[in-house]
Every structure is written in C-alpha cells, then in structure tokens.
Image: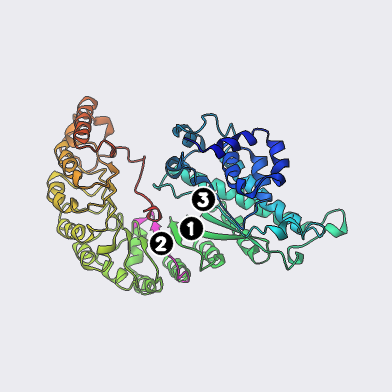
C-alpha cells in the first residue's frame, strides 16, 4: 500500500506547470517524494525544476528511487531493464506511468536542472541567493547497474544511453559558458567563473566504446576547470585501442574508481605493458576485469618472456582488490604466480575459459583466498577429469562463504555432479548456481534438487536441458547450447513438471529453476 504522502505528491504533480511555480512555497521535506513521483510519471519539467532548486547538498538518483517501500524490490531487480516493465510488474504502482517519455529524457532533465543552478550562480545578480543558500555538491547517478544480475544487453545499452545524455549536458554547459553572447558582459570563459563557485560533482558509471571515447576524453580533460565535474565510480571500456585506453585511464580520479572492466579484441604485447602499468596506479581499486576475446593471442601473451611475470608482480600494488576476472586468459599452471602476491584475499574470482590445470585449483583450494570466496566462475574449464578432485577440495574450503557458483560448459555429467553433491550441500549460503551447458540427465538434476533443500538461501539455478530429453541425437552431447532443436518437448515438459512438484513438496517453490541462459545471470559482486 502506498504511503499517504506519496498519494498527495501524485496529486500535486498532475498540473506540472503549477507544481513548478509552487516549489518555493513547499516545505523542503517534500522534495524527495516529489522527485519520486515526478520521475515515475515522466514529468521532465518538474524534475528539472526540482533539481534546479534542490535544497540538500546531495541528490542521489539511486537512493531516491529505491527508497519506496511499496516497490523497492521491483526497483532493485528490474529498473535498469525497462522502466515501463518495472512499473507494470509492481502491482502497487499505477499502470500508465511514464507515458511515452524514455528514460534518457528523465536523466537529461536532471542534468538540465544542475546546469540551471550553475548558470544562475554565474550571474552576478543572483549569485548570492539560491546557490549560496543551497549549494548542491553531489549529483550521484551511480547504481543504475546495481540490479542484481549482470551481462544483460538491454541494461548495457541503458548505461550507454544514460551516460550519453549526461555527457551531452556537460558538453552543452561548457559550450554555453565559453561562447560569447551579444552583450560583452555575458561573454565568459570557464576560467573566468567566480572562484567562490563550488563545483558540482557528477558521480557516474561509464561504459565507453570507440564511438564515445573522443567526447569522454574531452569531458574528463575539462574536469579541472569545469563547474560540473565528472567523477567515475565504475569504468568499462570495450574494444578501445591501447593508447586511447591509457589516455582515458590517466584522466580518471585514482582515488574514486572502484571497478575497472577492460575488454579487448586485439592487443599486442607492448600494449599489455602500458595498460597494466596504467591499471596499477588505481591502488584503491576493488574490482578488476581484464578480458580478451582472442584466446590465441592471450596464449601468445602468456608465453612471451617477462610479460606475465610483469603482470603478476604488479598485481601486488592493488592492495584493496576483492574481485578479479581474467576471462579467456591462458593461465595454465600460473595461478599461484598471479595470485600469491595479492595483499588481501579475493572475494570474487572469475576464470572462464582459462585452461586451468589441477595444480591451479589445488593452489586455489589451499590459498588464503578460498575461505573468503563469495563468487566463483570456472566456466569453460573441463572439470570432469583431473580437475574434479581439486575443484571439490576448493568447494569444501569455500563452502562457508560461497554465494554464487558458475560452472557452465564444464563437461560435468551425472557421475561428477553426484560425487560433488556432498561438498556442494555444505555451501549453505549459496544463492546462485549456474550449470547450463553440461551433459546432465534428469536423474542428476533431481538428485541436485533433492539435496538443495539444505541450501536455504538458494534463489536461482540455471540448468541444462537434460540429455535424456533429446531425441534422434547420437551419443551423449558434451555441449547442449546449440541442440535445442533436438529436444523432445513432451518429455522435457514432463521432467519440468516432476521437478516443480519436488520443489513444492520441499516448500521451495520460490526457487527459480530455469534453462534460460540469457535470462537472469550471476549476481554482481557489489550486490552480494
């Protein structure tokens, strides 16, 4: 049930023009609830006016939109995917919200409100009034990706669109300040802004591609003199040339960045040295993701004399690192060298398609990292042979802390899964289990389901199509991701029904068991 004050706010914003004019007469305590209502109903003019006259030093996008008891859960899980879908899935929220305004316009309205404050503050006639009385110091636009599950393409597009709108606002403000007007008194450069003008920090999460890197570089270079300062919390760059990557990293605030996610398609050994050296300047970094899509080049890089040793030795400079992802790296036999120099134990380790050897998992199971791991991804490594015993040992050591486990495409069969179940059952805090693309039968899956009763926190299991539900398929498939056309739909529906009945009988019907590998994915480390 919605709070009475929120219902009143909805009535106030129906006449948007009158609401904008009445802001000066309203108590400051009503600003947060008016902001929520204006955002939900797509009232961009009111949003701009609210930010323009915001009476508090901090305006946090995430806090304002997630602090609604009647739909907090929906916001946390579904907001980034689609605002309209979010509101439609929340039964306590109006169905016809947002009308036809895209989310970009709502974020743009907030930027325009900040611009109005700064432009007013540069006017000698009003500098002593609003800006002096209510100096907005921080516009926090982070948290747009704190949605519980990552690797969602729609969400990534949302991130890019959001940042494009924010950057457009910053660029427009700089252009307006720097360009002369008809009156000589109105001609003003960034350097000539009043020295008493407090800058507004815009805290953001950035996703950068080759098409947006040029403007981002310009915006970050203007930080030193602009009244609107771009401060990055999470930085993701995709397929940027090494020199541009190094340039952008050099412009980021070393103290404020918590996550660095770099993905490359082509990279020479020389570029690796430059990028690694740039990364190691972020000594407060909590999360590092360094991934590559061309495994042959990664193998060449690992084999080049001194390059891998350089990375391993430099890793010790990241004294606060808690999350590491080296997807599709050739790490065979080198995990000890890579991780032994870290100052703090890792809590999230993702090593998909890293060609790990038994010695790697043996080291990891005996390392200081194992008892602290909350998130572990070993997808694409063959766990069905010699890797199975050290993998099981690792599960035993991590059982008290492990929240998320992803072992997709690891060639696990029933015999491997069943022998692992006693150790897996000890992971009583496990929330997510990814098993997709393993050749498991309905017998193995039912055995897992029956043992999962001892995992009270389990929320999501992504499992493969059972191999006994295929028809006209010779042999046992080692991978099932391209074989859906061979599924016996009737038999699979029967297995699903049986598994659902088992969940109901165990009182665990709330746990989502799905074969949709493109649906919910492993939770983000910072949401755990």
Picture coordinates of residue 437 (x, y %)? 25, 43
Q: Nearer the viewer, mark 2 or mark 3?
A: 3
Q: Residues within 10 Å of mark 2 (few under 14, many from 20)?
A: many
Q: CA distance from mark 2 to mark 3?
A: 23 Å
The residue nearer to you, when weighing 431 against 410, is 431
The answer, for residue 13, to whether it is visible in the render is: no
Mark 1 = which residue? 234
Q: CA distance from mark 3 to mark 1?
A: 18 Å
Q: Nearer the viewer, mark 3 or mark 1?
A: 3
Q: CA distance from mark 2 to mark 1?
A: 9 Å
Q: Earlier in the sequence, mark 2 or mark 1?
A: 1
Picture coordinates of residue 225 (x, y %)? 68, 65
Residue that protrudes farthest toward the top in the picture = 490
User: In the image, 512: left or right of 201?
Assistant: left
The residue nearer to you, when weighing 65 against 152, is 65
Picture coordinates of residue 475 (x, y %)? 15, 37
Residue 293 on the magenta span: yes
Picture quarter containing residue 503?
Answer: top left
Picture coordinates of residue 149 (x, y %)? 39, 47
User: In the image, 478: left or right of 459?
Assistant: left
* Numbered disc total: 3
Q: Residues within 10 Å of mark 1 (few under 14, many from 20)?
A: many
The answer, for residue 414, to whether it is visible in the render is: yes
Which structural element holds mark 3? Answer: helix
Q: Residue at x 48, y 56 (%)?
A: 236
User: The magenta stretch spans which residues?
Assistant: 281-295
Q: Tell me whether circle 2 and circle 1 mark residues in contact (CB < 8 Å).
A: yes
Tag of residue 63: 3
């Amino acid at each position: 049930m919605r709070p009475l004050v929120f219902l009143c706010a909805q009535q106030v914003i129906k006449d948007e023009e009158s609401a904008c004019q009445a802001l000066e007469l309203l108590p400051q305590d009503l600003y947060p609830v008016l902001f929520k209502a204006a955002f939900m109903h797509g009232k961009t003019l009111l949003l701009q006016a609210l930010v323009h006259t915001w009476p508090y030093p901090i305006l946090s996008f995430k806090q304002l939109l997630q602090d609604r008891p009647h739909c907090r859960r929906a916001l946390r899980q579904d907001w980034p995917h689609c605002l309209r879908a979010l509101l439609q899935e929340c039964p306590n929220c109006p169905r016809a919200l947002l009308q036809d305004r895209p989310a970009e316009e709502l974020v743009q309205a907030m930027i325009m409100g900040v611009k109005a404050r700064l432009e007013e503050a540069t006017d000698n006639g009003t500098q002593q009034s609003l800006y002096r009385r209510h100096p907005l110091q921080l516009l926090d636009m982070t948290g747009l990706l704190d949605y519980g599950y990552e690797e969602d393409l729609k969400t990534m597009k949302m991130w890019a669109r959001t940042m494009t709108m924010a950057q457009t606002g910053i660029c427009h403000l700089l252009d307006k300040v720097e360009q002369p007007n008809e009156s000589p008194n109105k001609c003003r450069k960034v350097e000539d802004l009043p020295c008493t003008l407090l800058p507004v920090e815009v805290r953001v999460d950035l996703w950068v591609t080759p098409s947006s890197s040029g403007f981002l570089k310009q915006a970050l270079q203007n930080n030193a003199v602009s009244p609107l300062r771009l401060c990055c919390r999470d930085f993701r760059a995709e397929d940027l040339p090494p020199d541009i990557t190094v340039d952008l990293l050099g412009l980021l605030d070393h103290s404020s960045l918590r996550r660095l996610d770099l993905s490359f398609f082509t990279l020479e050994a020389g570029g690796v040295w430059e990028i690694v050296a740039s990364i190691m300047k972020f000594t407060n970094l909590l999360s590092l993701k360094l991934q590559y899509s061309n495994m042959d080049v990664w193998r060449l890089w690992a084999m080049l004399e001194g390059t891998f040793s350089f990375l391993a030795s430099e890793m010790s400079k990241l004294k606060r690192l808690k999350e590491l992802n080296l997807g599709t790296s050739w790490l065979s036999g080198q995990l000890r060298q890579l991780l032994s120099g870290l100052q703090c134990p890792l809590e999230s380790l993702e090593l998909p398609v890293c060609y790990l050897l038994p010695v790697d998992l043996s080291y990891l199971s005996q390392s200081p990292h194992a008892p602290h791991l909350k998130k572990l991804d070993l997808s694409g490594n063959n766990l069905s042979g010699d890797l199975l015993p050290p993998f099981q040992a690792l599960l035993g050591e991590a059982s008290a802390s492990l929240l998320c486990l992803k072992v997709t495409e690891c060639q696990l069969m029933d015999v491997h899964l069943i022998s692992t179940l006693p150790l897996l059952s000890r992971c009583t805090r496990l929330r997510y289990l990814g098993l997709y693309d393993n050749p498991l039968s309905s017998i193995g899956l039912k055995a897992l389901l029956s043992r999962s009763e001892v995992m009270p926190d389990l929320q999501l299991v992504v499992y493969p199509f059972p191999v006994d539900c295929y028809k006209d398929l010779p042999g046992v498939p080692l991978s099932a991701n391209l074989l859906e056309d061979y599924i016996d739909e009737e038999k699979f529906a029967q297995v699903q029904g049986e598994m659902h009945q088992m969940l109901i009988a165990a009182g665990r019907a709330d746990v989502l068991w799905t074969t949709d590998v493109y649906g919910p994915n492993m939770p983000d480390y910072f949401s755990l």
